[in-house]
Image (cartoon, helix red, strand yellow):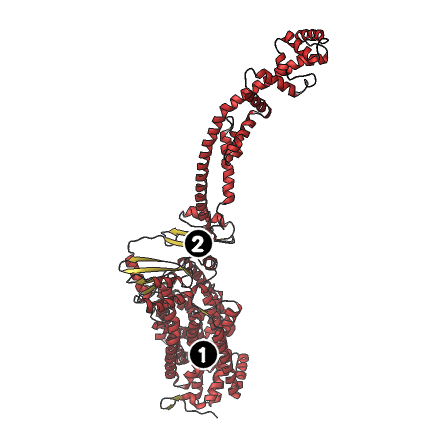
Amino acid sequence: MKRLVAVAFAAVAIYILFATYSSHVFDVLIYDESRLMPPDIEPKLVDAILKNSTAGESKARSLPVVIFGPRIEEKARNLSRLYPNTTSAWSILDTALNVYNEKVNEILDNATARFRKVALEISNSTKEVCKELENLAEGYRRAREEARRLIMGTYGVVALGKAVDNATGKFLSIYNNLVGAYDIDTAVRIAADMAYGNVSRYLTNVTWNNWATEKAVDSVAAEMLSTQLNKTLIDLARTVSVIGVQQYVYLSLVNKTPDVLRPYLHYLICGGDVEMAVSMFRNNLLRNITNAWPPPSLFSLPAAANLIYQEKYALAIVKTYEETPHIPLELGVPVSTSFLLKSFTQVVIEDVSKIDRATALALFLVLLAIMGTILTPVLIVSIVGVTYLAVLGFFYQIHEVQKIYYLTVYMAAPVIFAIGVDYMLLMASRYAEERALGKEKSEAVASVRRYANRAIAASAAVVATSLGSFTISRLPFMQSIGIGYIITTIFIVLSVFLIFPAALYILGDKVFWPKKTVSIHSGRSKLMEMAVSTALKKPLTIILIAVTVTLLSFLFLITALKVTTNPVVAMPETQYKKALEIATTYFSNITALSTTYILMEKPPPPGFLTELEKMPHFVNYTVEKRGNWYVISLKLSVEETSDELLKVYRKLDELRAAYGPYLIGGSASWKNIIFQEIYVQFWNMQVYLVLVVVFIILSILLKSFLIPLRLIATVLMSISWSLALEVFIFQELLGEPTYWLVPIILFAFLMAVGTDYDIFIITRIREELERGAEEKEAVRKAIVTTGPVITGAAIILAAAFSTLLLSQITLLRQVGFTIAFAALVDAFIVRPFIVPALIVLAGKYNWVWIGGYSVKKSFK
């Protein structure tokens, strides 16, 4: 025992040394599977060719950015200011408006220039005419005034009968002398000539009857002007004086003026305001043009309309040479796998810390409730916690030799806590049982170690085999998971076989402080005994029920299970994921989110290019010569991880037969590799390999052929039941499809941890049989005795994995729920009911082994 303690202290020292590096492991984790891929696979070969052919080149990349929330136009414009090469609905609109305005201004400038030229000609040409007409009209007006004065100085004076001045007084005197000898008109004319000079000729058409009319005035004025002007000019002067010079000129020119100038003629004649007419012409022409051809708007431009959805969402394309440009989230959210992974990394780091604390606390509280002591839970959780930190530190130490995939670390905590606590709880309970039988401390610890060598070693071997089976994958990131779990199992085994027994030896019964020892819970023992008795009395009924439920579960899974290989589904609802959903939902026709490359040694046939345009989610393609290869870059509107890429790869693979050999790389090829090398290979090979190896290990350790088969069958029952419930809750109720890793991880974990309880029970049955108990009694006693401990262990396992429900990642929530439920089903249904029923039905064949029976007993 002293050697055990010394070795245990050395192990603890090494663990603590590794634990000091545990926090650094998160700096070296790899989240992108493509970085952990073998070099000889098709997409890797394509990447190498493309890298060599573009060495030294620096190309701008187009990064889609989704804009949502209030003030999307303001955000888009601010983004364009930050990255001037940004294309958005408003940048397209601005460009279109600039072109439109330039064209309209060009039309306006040309038309205005022509209008101004003609307007100036009209203005200048009519200026002199109007001046002459104004003089003519002014002369006519003066003639009318003279005519009016003459008429008033003659007929008016006669009519009034009195004179107004000396001249009219002279006229009136003469008229009065003549009126008796002549008629009025003759007397007026004679008196006018005598008083005013030779003016009677102007009064030719004036009589006593019409002298007071305007016609008389016009007649006198015309007679006065006839000495200077001909009749035509006199008529013109009369007309112009009546309607005005500008109106006369306007009327004269209006019918001779082109229609386009006619509305502005009255502004131009007689040297009018040309600039006002030009301005009015320009404004009216602009109004007519915009009415006939309205300016472009967001929704009249297809290119702009495609980048905006109901003024709720907008898409901008940022062209940049940066791999991950800094785009403020208040302006827009980039749609990119690198940004998704970056946000995913932050969530993982936050979740690991949160889940680790929750797991440790949950396990401590469960242990406290199960054992009713304080020191034992503290001791177990402390040893397991140090083991976990040591594993993380060890991962960091080997990361340069063995790359660490993020899921390896993420799933390490529940594995270490669940299995480690289970093992130590069983060992602590066995120690308490041995001490209750009166054995000394050293002898009790030795019994515990023998028990560990038989039961826990078998369980650990199955755990390592099942979880470590990922190492057979061709893909390094899956190998990383398998190697990581083998390392994790080794650390757990070292803690269980060295550190915990040494702690039991050092502390002795003080480990149960404040109690002196721990007793089996009698209430749970009675319930377990009732369950076992029922199974032993009606084994066939129990098995028929179990088989029926299993068949129904399989039928439900076959008809309802929807598996997705898109890791975005498993990612938390971050802004980057929301942006991706918006882009693929509302802008799928224009957003190139993934690129698949086709490399041909000859120019691509036209028929092949036509087939590419028929691809689902097609956006566009380009063809270029790079070195010895013709590279076709097929742009698709689905993200690099979408399930739809599998359809694209299969279609491209089919076309090889018609269009010759070529290489397929990029997103679709990577998707096919991951799906084929993990999902398909797992179900076609890895599952069967695990089952065979587990069967061989259990057959050797348990010395039985039938018990391992029965154990595997019951684990598969638990898997089918728990997976069916997971599908019903997450898929049918919550609308979350099952991520493809869930069934794989579920199988691997349940095959690993689901055998624990069975091994503990079978080991205990064997012990009872070797002590001379009858088979039924041995079954009853083994299950009843280990039942409370196994129930507690199942609750611990369920608690450890249920903390994954705190994660923001769908994959881990699904895994946590499924394994937690399976652990409880295994402990409360499978082990107390189905296991004893199958054992009693199998009878002596349970112990068939090489050369006979490993236990020479028979049922009675």
- As measured in the structure, the alpha-carbon distance from the residue carrying label 2 to the one carrying label 1 is 46 Å
Secondary structure of residue under mark 1: helix
Considering depth in this image, is 160 or 585 the residue closer to the camera?
A: 160
Q: State the residue position of label 1.
A: 716
Residue for point 43% across, 44% down = 99
Q: Is residue 635 visible?
A: yes
- Looking at the image, residue 657 sits to the left or right of residue 570; the answer is left
Residue 393 visible in the current orientation? no
What amino acid type should be assigned to the residue bearing mark 1?
A: Leu
User: Which of 515/620 is in front?
Assistant: 620
Q: Do the CB atoms of the residues marked 2 and 1 lie less than 8 Å apart?
A: no
10 Å crowding of disc 2: few (<14), some (14-19), many (20+): many
Q: Amino acid at mark 2?
A: Val
Q: Position of residue 344 (x, y in %)?
A: 43, 60
Q: Position of residue 353 (x, y in %)?
A: 44, 62
Label 2, on which residue?
Answer: 65
Is 212 positioned to the left or the right of 349 in the image?
A: right
First reached walking from the N terminus: tag 2 or tag 1: 2
